[in-house]
Image (cartoon, rainbow, N blue to C red):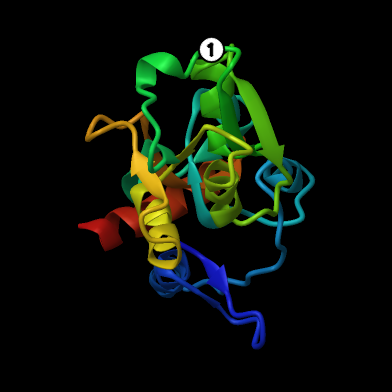
Amino acid sequence: YFDMDPNTKIPHGIMVDLMKEAGKKLNISVQWTEEVGWGSMIEGLKTGRYDAVCSSVWQNAARSVQADFSTPIGYATVDAWGRADSQYTMADFNDVNIKVSTIDGEMSDMIAKNMFPKAQRVSLPQNAPFSDVLLQVVTGKADVAFVEPKIAADFLKVHPGSLKNLTKGDPVATYPITLMLPRGDVELRSMIDGALTEIIY
């Protein structure tokens, strides 16, 4: 969705392209101003450090209490991934003996907390790459991780045969992909939704 070239600091990805197009349609300048973690992105909206979180955010009820969201630009599914020899199924995950690899404040953490509250969470810091979530599974520090199929596919290119999809076509969850906006800013949301709707259609 969004990436930053470490040498040039130039952002690229689907969300960058989408925001450039939205900016053209709205005749506004889009500036990428701050890199924030999943657990602290709402605070930056509340304090006005930036106008929107545009790197793609999955909308859920907990976040909706504190922020608003744009019209969805698509939907993301989340699967459960275990080691290649894992025999676990979804029915096994809500157990005190199961360790779930998560990132603090990110959706994998919320999925574990809300859907599998008995499982132990093996948390990584907010800015950890998603590959580290899967690496914890492969190295035996965790039993399962909840990530999008594309993240697992990219990991498997580097570590072939190391993971197994434990959900077998029945995702753990599906979330709308949105922009996160300040709570109650109706004018901004209306502008963003108008541009996104035009782009989507």
Q: Mark 1 points at which residue?
A: 95
Can residue 71 be seen in this snapshot?
Answer: no
Q: Nearer the viewer, residue 77 or 68?
A: 77
- Residue 60, given in percent of the width and then of the height, sits at 49, 29
Q: Which of 187 and 4 is in front in this view?
A: 4
Identity, as a three-letter code, of the amino acid under mark 1: Asp
- Residue 69, given in percent of the width and then of the height, sits at 49, 40
Q: In which quarter of the image is the N terminus?
A: bottom left
Instruction: Classify mark 1: helix, strand or loop.
Output: loop
Can residue 3 be seen in this snapshot?
Answer: yes
Dot 1 crowding, Cα within 10 Å, few <14, some 14–19, many 20+: few
Q: Quadrant of the C terminus?
A: bottom left
Could you tell me which residue is drawn at 51 percent across and 17 percent down? 116
Q: Which of 178 and 133 is in front in this view?
A: 133
Asked whether, in this view, residue 55 is left or right of residue 151, the answer is right
Asked whether, in this view, residue 64 is left or right of residue 34, the answer is left
Could you tell me which residue is drawn at 42 percent across and 16 percent down? 92
Q: Is residue 34 above or below residue 191?
A: below
- Residue 57, given in percent of the width and then of the height, sits at 51, 46
